[in-house]
Image (spheres, grey):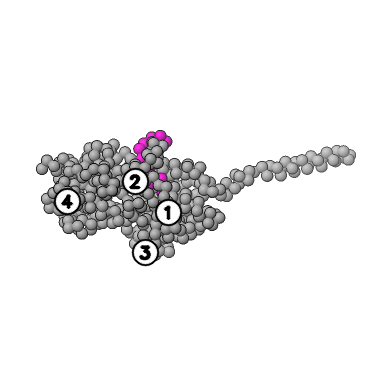
């Protein structure tokens, strides 16, 4: 080979080496970095099953919250793992274990059922996954935390406080109605009903205690399985009690609709407290006129930002959201984004450990709070309340509302009141 040919071969070889090097360099640093800097978030909710309506509200709210942040926290690209609880504690636990061990989620957010929360908090603790803002409210969660705070501290704060912190509002609203002469109970008797779940029984026990302290007589209780719609035996039992008030909570929309309809068909002569009515946006489509005069706790869409959220949600997903489901889920997803941004700024990276540490050091001590919510004015925790949020006016609070013809009217507290309590027509005619 002559010198010129050799030179050409060498130059060609160098050119090929340069191309290879360029090709390697051409693996975009941005893509490589994005692959490394990914924050994987497990969203726990009932995406199938009897409460899938709630799951759809969760999913829409989370997507909207993270869309506002361009699905990024700092340089971390956010990916979701939708953990389907199927409204079943065992199935939820299996799904959570898979998300933690195989899909390697960095954190979890949300959940609906108390029974699922009680089970899933074990999976979160076993896998050391900080799980933020579960909706499960039963006091059993608090008891487990108090029993072993180090282990169960991975259940990183409840969205919804224990029921006894909210049930007293119903008694105050009814006592006020009696004092003002809108209603005269025949015997101050209360019947307790609800789903046979951690939440249903926790709510029932809490409101029964509040009524007893106010001098009312608890004449019996009747619980039914989740998803039940044939309630003849329950209605027979409740009618035999002859209560002035029926108080309970049902989280499954189809069960609640059946309960209210059958209560009307049985002509139960009671004021009905249905804590759970209004937890899905299309509650009136499900219950119809059977929901008229019923009392519940629900935050109307008051703020302008909240009304805009409803419009945007309906446009994107084609159905009406609820304040108690989509509204709160949106606020808590936004709160998580704030927490993650602050944790990143403080620790320089996002992972299970840094999110957990920030939650313990800043979230649970009240050093960080969320004040840009569309539902509540301020979400904050304190050492005296954890794992519950701070409750009260200006913090986490639900007004007592009376439902009529698809509308919610606030009747308590006085500072928010839109109208006085209205006696149901089936009682007014007596």
In the shown orientation, is residue 291 left or right of residue 128? Answer: left
Tag 3 secondary structure:
helix
Tag 4 secondary structure:
helix
- On screen, residue 377 above or below 310: below
Depth-wise, is mark 2 or mark 4 nearer the camera?
4
Q: Is residue 369 visible?
A: yes
Q: Position of residue 210 (x, y in %)?
A: 23, 57
Can you identify the residue that label 1 sits on? 369
For the record, the magenta segment spans 314-332
Q: Position of residue 376 (x, y in %)?
A: 36, 48
Depth-wise, is mark 4 or mark 1 nearer the camera?
4
Where the C terminus falls, by quadrant?
top left
Can you identify the residue that label 3 sits on? 146
Q: CA distance from mark 4 to mark 3?
A: 40 Å
Tag 2 secondary structure:
helix
Residue pictured at 37% horizontal, 42% vertical: 303
Towards the viewer: 285 or 427 = 427
- Is 328 inside the magenta-drawn segment? yes
């Amino acid at each position: 080979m002559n010198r010129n040919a050799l030179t050409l071969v060498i130059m060609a070889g160098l050119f090929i080496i340069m191309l290879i090097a360029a090709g390697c360099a051409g693996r975009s640093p941005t893509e490589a970095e994005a692959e490394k800097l990914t924050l994987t978030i497990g969203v726990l909710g009932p995406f199938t099953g009897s409460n899938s309506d709630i799951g759809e509200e969760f999913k829409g709210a989370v997507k909207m919250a993270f869309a506002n942040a361009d699905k990024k926290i700092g340089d971390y690209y956010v990916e979701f793992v939708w953990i389907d609880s199927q409204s079943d504690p065992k199935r939820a636990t299996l799904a959570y274990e898979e998300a933690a061990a195989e899909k390697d989620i960095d954190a979890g957010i949300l959940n609906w059922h108390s029974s699922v929360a009680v089970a899933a908090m074990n999976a979160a603790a076993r896998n050391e996954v900080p799980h933020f803002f579960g909706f499960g409210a039963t006091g059993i969660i608090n008891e487990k935390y108090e029993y072993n705070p180090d282990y169960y501290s991975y259940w990183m704060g409840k969205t919804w406080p224990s029921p006894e912190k909210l049930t007293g509002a119903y008694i105050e609203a009814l006592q006020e109605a009696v004092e003002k002469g809108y209603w005269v109970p025949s015997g101050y008797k209360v019947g307790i009903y609800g789903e046979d779940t951690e939440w249903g029984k926790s709510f029932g026990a809490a409101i029964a205690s509040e009524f007893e302290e106010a001098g009312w007589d608890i004449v019996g209780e009747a619980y039914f399985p989740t998803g039940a719609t044939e309630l003849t035996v329950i209605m027979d039992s409740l009618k035999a009690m002859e209560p002035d008030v029926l108080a309970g909570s049902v989280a499954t929309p189809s069960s609640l609709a059946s309960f209210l309809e059958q209560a009307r068909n049985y002509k139960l002569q009671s004021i009905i407290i249905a804590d759970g009515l209004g937890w899905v946006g299309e509650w009136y489509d499900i219950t119809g006129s059977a929901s008229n005069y019923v009392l519940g706790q629900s935050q109307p869409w008051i703020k302008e930002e909240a009304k805009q959220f409803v419009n945007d949600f309906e446009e994107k997903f084609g159905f009406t959201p609820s304040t108690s489901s989509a509204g709160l889920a949106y606020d808590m997803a936004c709160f998580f984004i704030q927490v993650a941004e602050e944790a990143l700024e403080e620790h320089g990276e996002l992972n299970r450990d840094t999110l957990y540490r920030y939650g313990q050091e800043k979230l649970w001590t009240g050093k960080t709070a969320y004040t840009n919510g569309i539902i509540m004015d301020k979400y904050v925790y304190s050492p005296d309340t954890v794992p519950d949020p701070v409750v009260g006016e200006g913090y986490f609070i639900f007004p007592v509302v009376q439902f009529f013809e698809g509308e919610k009217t606030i009747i308590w507290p006085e500072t928010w009141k839109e109208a006085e309590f209205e006696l149901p027509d089936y009682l007014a005619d007596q």
